[in-house]
Image: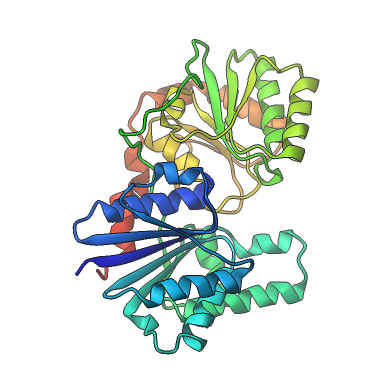
Amino acid sequence: MKKKYIILCNSAEIGGAETMCVIIANKIISKKNSEVFFICYQNGRIFKRLDQRAEIKILSGKNSFQKAYSLNKFIKHLEGDLTIVSVVTGLNFIAALNIIHHKIFKNFDFYRSKNICLYSWEVNNLRSRKITKIKYLFNIFKLNIISLFSKKLICISRDIFDEFRRFLIYNKNLNKIGCPVYEMNPKIKEKLEISITKQDYIISISRHHPQKDLLLLVDIFYRLIKFGLMYKLHIYGEFNKNYTYLLRKKIKELNLESKVILFQPVTNIISAIKGAKFMLHTAAWEGLGNSLIESIYNGTPVVALNCPGGIKDYLRTGENGILINSRNADIIAETIISKNILLNKLKSSNMKETIIEYEANYVLDQLFNED
């Protein structure tokens, strides 16, 4: 009988957690004797990256409990070995899923499944969003429920691991495993009018959101231009009406319309990454920073600002890029200019070995080492 895997995905857009879901699903389905069900909330572009042999199911329901109930009805009729992999940034759905498993579907032996939850954010970031103390404590309570009913609870960065270990009552199932790097699918034909340009460019892959601090990114680039760096800046990421407006306004104010180009996400970004001089990343915090790992894996060094999250786990100055301990645009630009020779040298080197623990086969072996 085939082994069955359920991959639970928060959404179907192209983001870090969603890409992680697809990588895991595609790698599993490439194995013999396995069947993959890809479960999420709605249709979206991420399906284009998904192996066609995976069965897609869109959950019905207006809230977390209704969606969890819908999923449990589906799970209840599956036979044989079952592994559930939840890649989530929210708590309500997975907490509801666990409660419903045990309180409603009592005849379903949940422990025949290997329930694996992967988390890609820091709980202390919830504090910075000015939530109430009661809500924060309730989130900790929900995470303890999830931990209790999970065979494995995976943290994709050291920061998240340390935070979880502090407040989880049961943490013997806690592991730190990185996110698998996305590898180009040769069957996907790209439409690359995007970054095919004769002029050298810097790349940034970030959705338009305050967390990514793209306004600071443009400020840094403006100073690089003043220093005489004759590059363009290509920003790929999901547009947001309000933040994109602020970003375009900043670009116009600095007279950079011809040098900063905004692109919507593309199905396969690898060629654009390979063509860049380096990647510049300015997020205020990150779960892991998937696009940075993809950049290093594909031979493009990364310049990033040190922040809470997983970037400092793998980005090492002189080996695969530059990690800068400042959020001052002048200092950052000066550092990049002073290290430009190093960046050019890294561009022509093999940096894959610096992130071997994020290679997809290695990560999946760690996830399913009981299989």
Across and down, in percent, residue 120 comes to 52, 58
* Residue with the most extreme top position: 198
Location of residue 344 with respect to 67 vertically, above or below = above
The quadrant in which the C terminus is found is bottom left
Picture residue at 53% right of the left edge, 82% below the top: 99
Query: Looking at the image, can residue 70 be seen?
Result: yes
Q: Quadrant of residue 240?
A: top right
Depth order, front residue of 23/294: 23
Q: Quadrant of residue 150?
A: bottom left
Query: Looking at the image, can residue 319 be seen?
Result: no
Depth order, front residue of 17/51: 51
Depth order, front residue of 321/94: 94
Q: How many marks?
A: 0
Across and down, in percent, residue 106 comes to 44, 89
Across and down, in percent, residue 177 comes to 40, 59
Across and down, in percent, residue 159 comes to 54, 60
Picture residue at 36% right of the left edge, 76% below the top: 77
